[in-house]
Structures are given as C-alpha cells and as structure tokens.
Amino acid sequence: MRLHADQCRTTLRRMSDPLFPDVDPRPAGDGLDEALPRYETANRDQIELQPCDLETLLPPGHAARLVWRFVEGLDLSAFYATIRARDGRAGRPAIDPKILVALWLYATMDGVGSAREVDRLCYSHDAYRWVRGGVSVNHHTLSDFRVAHQAALDDLLTQSIAALLHRGIVTMARVAHDGTRVRGQAGAGSFRRGDTLQECLRQARKQVKRTAQQTDAPVNARAEAAQRRAAADRVARVEDALAQLPEVQAVKERQRGKRASAARVSTTDPDARVMKMADGGYRPAYNVQLATDVDSRVIVGVTVTNIGSDRSSLLPMLAHVQARTGRRPDAALVDGGCFTRETITDAAAQGITVYAPLSTRRGGPTAKPCRTDSLAVRGWRKRMGTRAAQKIYKDRAATAEWVNAQCRTHRTLSAIPVRGLQKVHTWALWIALAHNMIRTLAIVPHLMT
C-alpha cells in the first residue's frame, strides 16, 4: 500500500519518538539525511495588525472609567476657550482637553509624573489606551498641557470642593494645615553668586549669537531651532537669577545680620531655595502648603512658596481657603512651627479658633502667660492645657500628616518634575485634584458610578 509523501513524513516523525529507541523508522536511501529540515520560526520584526475593541479593554468600575466619569462632570469651558482651531478656519483640530485632563489625573493617581512615561503608557497600557480613545498624543503636548492652565486647574479644584460642600461632606468645622518641603529640579551645584552670574550671562549671550549665526547645511532645522530655544532659555534663567539676587541677599541679612554671606541663586531654577529637609539635610526645594478638611480629609487649600520657614504661612492659607470655599473654618489645627502669637491674635479676630501645641523650648510659647499676651493668646494657652483641646489637636496628625504621606507615596509629591514657582504650583494642583477625586470615590462612590 503506497502512502502520500506527507503522510510518510508524519509516520516517520511519530515513529522517531523516544518510546521506540530501538526502531529506525527511516528506510535506507530515502535522502532525509542529506536534505535540510524545513520549519517555521519566530519572526518578531514583522508588523501585525490586530483588531481591538477599546471599550472591552477595561472591566466595569475600572479606575480609568471612574476618572473619565469624574472629568465629564467638571466644567472645562476654560480649557476649550484656549483652542485656536475653529470651524471655518485652517488648522489641525486640537486634542479634546477632556482626554488630557483625564490622562493626567489617572497618571497622578497611578504615581506617574513623567510626561514621557505617560506618552509610553498611552500606547502600551490598556487603561491609558482606553482614556486616549484612539487620539494621538505625545510627551510635548502632555508636558505643555500640565503647566499651561493654572487658573483653569485651580477652578477645577474649586469645583470639586464646592460639590462636596453642597452635599455637606466638607464641613469646614476644622481644617488641618501643614507644609512639606519637596526637592526641586535645581542642582546643588547650580547656585552662583553675583559675579559668577554676570559671567554666566555673558557666556549665555555669546551662545545665543553663535546659534543665530550657524549656517552649516548639515544641521537639521528642528535641531537648530531646539538649540536656539535652549540658548534663549539659558539667558532668561540667568537674567531671572540676577533679578532675584537682591531679594535673596536681603533675606539672608535679615536672618543673620552681619554674619550673612553672599547670596547665591540657581541658574537652572532661579525660584528654588535651599531649605532644610525632613532628614536634616539642605537641598534646593519648594514649600508646598496644604489645608485639609478634618472630617472628610479633602484638600481645601493649596499654596506653594519658596520660603523655608512656616511661621507666617497660616494667615495666607486661611485667606486662601476662604476665597476658595466662600467660608472661614471654625477651627485651625496647625503644627508648632506654623504660627506665632500674632497669628493667633489675627485668627481669633476672624472668628477662627487655633489649636496649636504649647512649646517647652527656650523662647517658644508655653503655658505660662506673658505680660505682652493678647486676650486671644491667653485664651489659647488656657485652652491647650485642657484634655478636650489636646484630644482635638490629635486629629491634626491623622489628617495633615496622612494627606502628606498619601501625596508623597502615591501621587508624585516626593520630587518635583517641573521648574519655576508657577509651574510647581500648577503641578501641586494636579495632585490635590487627584486626591480629592479619590476621596470623593471613597466617601460617596455612587456619585462616580
């Protein structure tokens, strides 16, 4: 009985199984020893087009779907007003701001702070692909959008707080206030004194002239434009550093008097200041101030300064919270380094009760009254000596410190990815908005589903 050639080969392969070690399945003279084997191997260079239904990528109730639902409930008219592409005019359509807001909120919740990393995830991670919805994005667009809408983003944070105020979730009965110093993008070696800054400015201007006079053909047009922008940015940063130098010098002289050394300012981030960090070291940083509603743990105030001390931060934060929410808190829970006796007096005049610890350090406020104390300060000393006030004050650590830890661990507050006081403030607003969205989901999940 004659078999087809393919059937013969199949039979030979089966008979070559190690179950039959003593059997030689190949008849003599079949030519298989001389012929090369034929088989299929992996080819990972080829491009495959795979059909994909984006809607089925994520299960119901996924965090990305909740973020999208949250963004749909926000008023984004300020973002749409900045779009230049209009009907009847030339120009490429802009990316829907709703997509970019949702991407940055989800990335902040996911602990991603790099625009390049968000760009990569938009094409490799199902959640980011679902939010993107087939719209092309790149890291330049993402980076520019994150810092270009401070006023609109501040309004979004106000909207999120107003919705919770309306439902009685944010009560403003007690607000915990605290500051955290976050490492900036400026290098410790970028700080220069006045004479060195003048030399840096001369060198930077020379670089601008050299890049403007480049006429060599091999230079790519896009690379040449990037070189010119980098040179111009360098000049602008050094000029800004020189402009801020007198102010920094005045602060040093006010703090140290005649012992003050020559002031130094960074050439990469002139707004950054050297501050004492939580580990005791000194590094370029910014001071991020957060005010949190104790009952809901929702952030109701965000300010950013480049002042290392928190002594004068309480009153500006209380004014900021009132402007954002339309009401004053009944009580403020503050750390020992965030107030003075004048602060307590001014807060009491506004009807705000301050809960702050009594200090036993030399020169600090103690339970023993002084002749120069105001009535408000005397009342504070007496109040903080009671167990009821001490029990109320314990909520500060469980609120302010918890929010700081959450933002540092899960929402990219551990390191600042941008430069400049205004951009850092905008970046802090993203973190506050993402935190409030998560708190809304935890407190009233039916509003998000």
Image: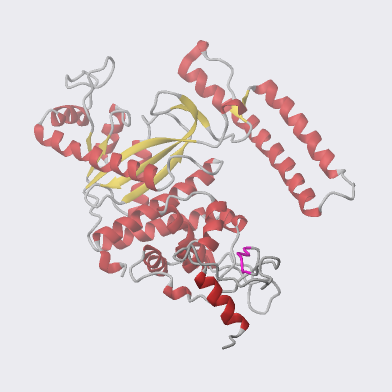
Q: Quadrant of the C terminus?
A: bottom left
Q: Nearer the viewer, residue 393 or 63?
A: 63
Q: Report the magenta residues as a range.
A: 39-44
Q: Nearer the viewer, residue 329 or 285?
A: 285
Residue 416 visible in the picture: yes
Residue 218 higher or lower than 203, as above or below:
below
Residue 338 at x, y percent in the picture: 32, 31
The outermost residue toward the top is 258
Q: Say which quarter of the image contains residue 186.
A: top right
In the rendered view, does 276 fall on the left or right side of 10? left
Give the dominant element type of the magenta stretch: helix, strand or loop.
loop
Q: Residue at x 45, y 41 (%)?
A: 304
Q: Colour scheme of this structure image?
A: secondary structure
Residue 423 higher or lower than 337, as above or below:
below
Q: Residue at x 37, y 51 (%)?
A: 323
Residue 42 inside the magenta-drawn segment = yes
Residue 216 inside the magenta-drawn segment = no
Q: Nearer the viewer, residue 140 or 6?
A: 6
Residue 125 at x, y percent in the picture: 48, 61
Q: Residue at x 55, y 57 (%)?
A: 120
Residue 339 higher or lower than 105, as above or below:
above
Residue 352 visible in the picture: no
Q: Residue at x 76, y 45 (%)?
A: 227
Residue 267 at x, y percent in the picture: 64, 32
Q: Quadrant of the N terminus?
A: bottom right
In the rendered view, does 119 fall on the left or right side of 106? right
